[in-house]
Image: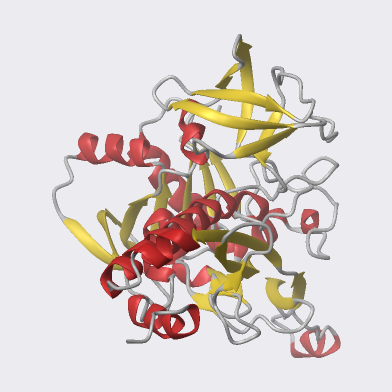
Amino acid sequence: MASLNMSSFSSALKILYPDSLEEVWFPEAPFLSWVPKAYDFEGSSRQTNAMFSGIRGSTQFGVALNGKTTPALAKFNVTRKKDYVLGSIDNETMMASQSNKGAIAKAIKVQVDAAAYEFGRSMAVQCWGDGSGTRGVVLSVAAGPVVTLNDRRDCVKFEVGMVLENKNAAGAIYAGTFLVTALDIDLGTVTLTLQGGAVAPIATDLLAREGDFLAGVGQSNCMSGVFAWIPVASPSATPFFGVDRSVNPVRLAGGRVRGGAKTIEEVVFDSLARGKTNGGKFDTVWMNSERASELQKSMQAKAFVDVQSAGKAKVGFQGFNLVTSSGALTVLDDPTCPYAYGLMTRRDAWEFATLGDAPHFAEEDGRRFLRESASDGIEFRLKMYGNLICQRPVDNVLIDFDGV
């Protein structure tokens, strides 16, 4: 009887994951799962054109004739970012289960699912990020070191066993790394072990997964997420994918509304009014899971709506509706969305563009598994080349629920 080997099992993996790996990571990143997908991000960049001014006219024909113009279009030339997750399987484990195809399938599926989970968590963090790669900001440090984060909810962006790096607010990356050995999400603390000559971080330091940071303020290897496209502060003249967004901040970088002492419902309705005034169209409000729970309880929402993900795999989510003069707004939640903020948006305003599936197996040589050179095992690689793209910034309002 022939043994199950890596070449023959590659076909079995296609049975285990008939709709690609999306169905595994989609639940970890609800917002990005909901965003429309494009798998043809070829060339050096992907251009998206946002119109921020139309053609001029006049009540007098001669004036209109002499004043003919073309629309003002901003050309965002979006480049790809990369993400990798590698997994290994010990050869002894493989051999010990080779007479039971179900056992070997389970062992490999556990590893691949774990890799897809890491990919999903990475995508969740990046899609709500500002492009800086930052996962948390240090509030204080106790002996251990035990780091307390500025926002305790940022703990969901870390995992036990994750290796971190840090840099200061000026953009300088410190030497060494930190191994996460414990998390307390309720307290907002991350316990670290220092590695490679690292010293304990200090207040205001920024934390990221190792390899995500680049030296410089706001520089990283990560995707440009929601807070890069729709920033908290009105954008400066610094080019963003080649565009000076300061010439028309709302139409090129979305609107911004501060809630102050208003209720969640009041802030949402005010944001809708502001967005409509600016020419935006909206169908969805995203917010942190805890904030959405508060809204649901305050309005005693009992009618839920089913929403499907966009992509090759179909994963369902549930939300609830807010009835407005512009129709129903669906409220959806994502635990990675910062608690302080919400995003009023429209589904068709966004696109997650990738080169091939996100992620996909590295099998350029026709094999999904490789023999490891430094250990007695085999290796698989998942990778992604792509970025989040906002095609209509005007269809977005960033809500600062507690800002004044």
User: Would you say residue 116 is visible in this rendering?
Assistant: no
Foreground residue among 300 and 307: 307
Question: Residue at 62% across / 49% down in the picture?
Answer: 227
Question: Residue at 41% across / 67% down in the picture?
Answer: 95
Question: Residue at 72% across / 17% down in the picture?
Answer: 202
Position of residue 37 measured from the top left corner of the image (x, y, whole percent): 51, 75
Position of residue 135 measured from the top left corner of the image (x, y, whole percent): 60, 39
Q: In the rendered view, tell whether residue 290 sits above or below residue 141.
A: below
Q: In the rendered view, tell whether residue 245 sits above or below residue 234.
A: below
Position of residue 216 measured from the top left corner of the image (x, y, whole percent): 85, 41
Position of residue 33 measured from the top left corner of the image (x, y, whole percent): 43, 64
Indicate the quadrant containing the C terminus: top left, top right, bottom left or bottom right: top right
Question: Residue at 42% across / 39% down in the picture?
Answer: 267
User: Would you say residue 37 is visible in this rendering?
Assistant: yes
Q: In the rendered view, tell whether residue 64 sits above or below residue 97.
A: below
Foreground residue among 201 and 401: 201
Q: In the rendered view, tell whether residue 114 sits above or below residue 390.
A: above
Q: Is 9 on the left or on the right of 77, as rendered?
A: left
Please give the count of numbered marks on the rendered protein: 0
Q: Is 368 on the left or on the right of 167, as rendered?
A: left
Point out the residue furthest to the front here: 1
Indicate the quadrant containing the N terminus: top left, top right, bottom left or bottom right: bottom left
